[in-house]
Amino acid sequence: MTVRNAGAALGAALLLLASGCSSGTADDPAGHHADHAAAGSSSASSSASSPAAAPSTTAEPTPVVADQMPGMPPVVDAANVYSETAAGMLAPAAQAARPMVYVPHNSGEVWEIDPATLEVVRTFPAGLEVQHVVPSWDMQTLYATDDVGNTITPIDPVTGENGPRIPVDDPYNMYFTPDGAAAISVAEARRSLVFYDPHTWVEQGRLEIPDCAGIDHADFTPDGRTAVFSCEFAGRVAVVDVPSRTVLRLIDMPTMNHHMGPQDVKLSPDGSRFYVADSDQGGLWVLDGAATRVIDEIPTGPGAHGLYPSRDATQLYVTNRQDDSVSVLDANTGAPITKWTIPGPSSPDMGGVTADGSQLWLSGRYNAEVYVLSTADGHLLARIPVADSPHGLCVWPQPGRYSLGHTGVTR
């Protein structure tokens, strides 16, 4: 397997993946996308707690988030929900993992790339149309999701070896409730969320959302009680109450795009807003932090798709799949900082930031390749040939105490 334009220092930087350890630990419509064609523990052991009362001679500490979902690891800093995902803050399960980049393909294969050598070291079949590689809530297992074959394939992140497939209904995407009590199959073709026991994979129940065609990506409020799911083919989002597993409301976007509309969803570090990428709109819609209304629009570029915070949670990277670019925004305000260009033709899609924060890895959805960008200045370190239609790439390990799913949404 050849690599073009590999940066000489890339391997050394990636060897920092296993450095450090966090202060909190976790042991633990009918049819599919138009663009598809072109086990965790139920509890966490965490040493993170509310900040101690400050001495009278100092300023009051930042208050923690009130009324958090029971069983969810506590928010340590209300001003930054990603405070426990900073560079090197690896929980024991993640620290034990072999550094690897997992690239699922719509052809049904998963390719494993050694980030130190940039070489493909293993491939294996994982179904009929693999969409994403998803870390479990306790970070002990990765799952390759096959929505056409209705299975997930477990992967041991310590060895990189895969296990037998597990039946799950239409797992286009997958998330975990913040308390780790349920895995959520985002069943796009069913317009439903299907809840499973994350140990036995017995179905717990399902929430049908018929007016959310193309249900897809999600993120959660700081208290873990509310989730926002994008409805790609309906031009809206669905706001879900997590404990009761009911729909609170649907929010229409000001322009309701139905082809490739709302895509990835990401909460700002301070919890004041949700960003919703919209491919057809060429930018982001912004919801208020309670997910009640649209408050802003941020142009980024045609094909706006994936959203990834930097390791220090100051920047938000937005992949513009039809613009050969990644936009860099202020993570809290959404103000544009810069734009990085990937020499075309390219189609930056989905991926993640390395544990040390130095690189952004992305699948090239329409170009059968993977891109590695420097987060220092956005220059292209490498482009690695893979098979056709690479999709929800997962960089592993990731910092954090627990995983909310997708390609590595950790907190």
Image (cartoon, rainbow, N blue to C red):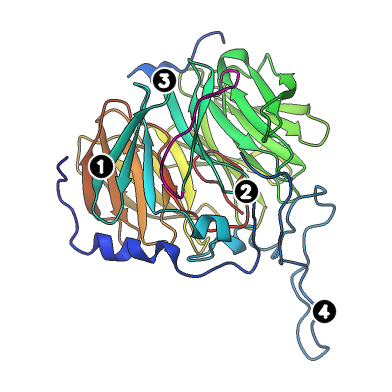
Are there few (<14), some (14-19), or many (20+) residues within 10 Å of tag 2?
many
Type of residue at label 1? Answer: Val
CA separation, marks 3 and 4? 52 Å
Give the left or right position of residue 155, taking residue 212 as reference.
left
Mark 1 vs mark 3: in front: 1
The dominant secondary structure in magenta is loop
Residue 252: name its quadrant: top right
Which numbered disc flags the more N-terminal residue, 1 or 4?
A: 4
Residue at the extreme bottom of the image, as rendered = 57
Assign the N terminus to one quadrant of the image. top left
Q: Which residues are magenta?
A: 158-170
Where residue 53 is drawn, which disc sits there? 4
Type of residue at label 4? Answer: Ala
Provide residue 188's location: percent of width, then percent of height: 57, 19
The residue identified by callout 1 is 120
The residue identified by callout 3 is 129
Residue 244 lies, with reference to residue 205, above or below; the image says: below
The residue identified by callout 2 is 138
Residue 199: name its quadrant: top right
Give the left or right position of residue 65, taking residue 168 as reference.
right
Provide residue 195's location: percent of width, then percent of height: 70, 27
Assign the C terminus to one quadrant of the image. bottom right
